[in-house]
Each structure stands twice: as C-alpha cells, then as structure tokens.
Amino acid sequence: CARLAVQLRDSTRVRAILSAMAMPTLQRARSALDAMVSSSGMDNSGVAASQMEAASQVLSSCLGVLREIIRFCDEPPKGSGDVHILSDVLTAAWPLLNDISSQQCCR
C-alpha cells in the first residue's frame, strides 16, 4: 500500500493515506509497550514472562510494519516548500519511539 500511495501526485493525500495506514499500528505498538511496562513491574512469575514475551513480539511486529511504511517514502519532497510525506506519521510515532528508547524493559 505504501508503495502505491507514494505514486500519487497529491502529497496531502499521500500524507493522509500513510497516516491512516500507520495509526492502527502505532496504537497497537503503544498497547504492547504498555503491557510490557506493566509486566516488567510484576513478580518474576511465568505469567509475567509470558505476557512480556507476547507483548515484545507484538511490538517488534508493529515496528516492522512501520519500517515497511517508511521504506518506500525516502524520496525528497517534490517542491522546496513541500512538507515531507512522512511528517504526520513521524510526528505521531516520535512519542512512542521515545518511550520505547527510555524503557528499561526494551533494552
């Protein structure tokens, strides 16, 4: 979908499509991170380890989807004043990425 979307000439429409593609993934990644943080605060039970493993797999998968969306969008904006087509996606992703980098359970 990202490969097809970047072929459109209307950069505003491309930004909207990419955002619509990325938002559910970012929400799922946020939920997975929240589950990891809550699981890391639990005692070292098998349940906590299982929840941590499942949540880390979901988070990893979501980051892979985000990588694929970004992968096809590396061309510079067409005009010097244009906003990059990934600006909305990266603006939404930045707080999540920052939180991931600051969590001990993600290191």
Image: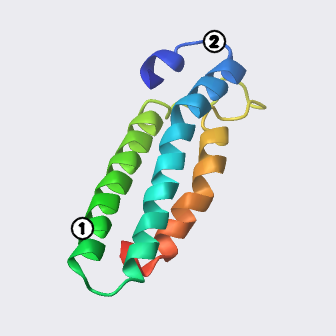
In the image, residue 29 sits, relative to residue 42, either above or below, namely above
Picture residue at 42% right of the left edge, 83% below the top: 41
Please name the residue that numbered disc 1 is placed on: 50
Callout 1: 10 Å neighbours few (<14), some, many (20+)? few
In the image, residue 30 sits, relative to residue 21, either above or below, namely below
Picture residue at 57% right of the left edge, 39% below the top: 23
Does residue 80 appear to the left or right of 5 in the view shown? right
Judge by depth and name the residue closer to the eye, 50 or 58: 50
Q: Nearer the viewer, mark 2 or mark 1?
A: 1
Does residue 43 appear to the left or right of 96 in the view shown? left
Q: Amino acid at mark 1?
A: Ser
In the image, residue 81 sits, relative to residue 103, either above or below, namely above
Q: Label 1, secondary structure: give it.
A: helix
Q: Amino acid at mark 2?
A: Arg
Q: Quadrant of the N terminus?
A: top left
Please name the residue that numbered disc 2 is placed on: 9
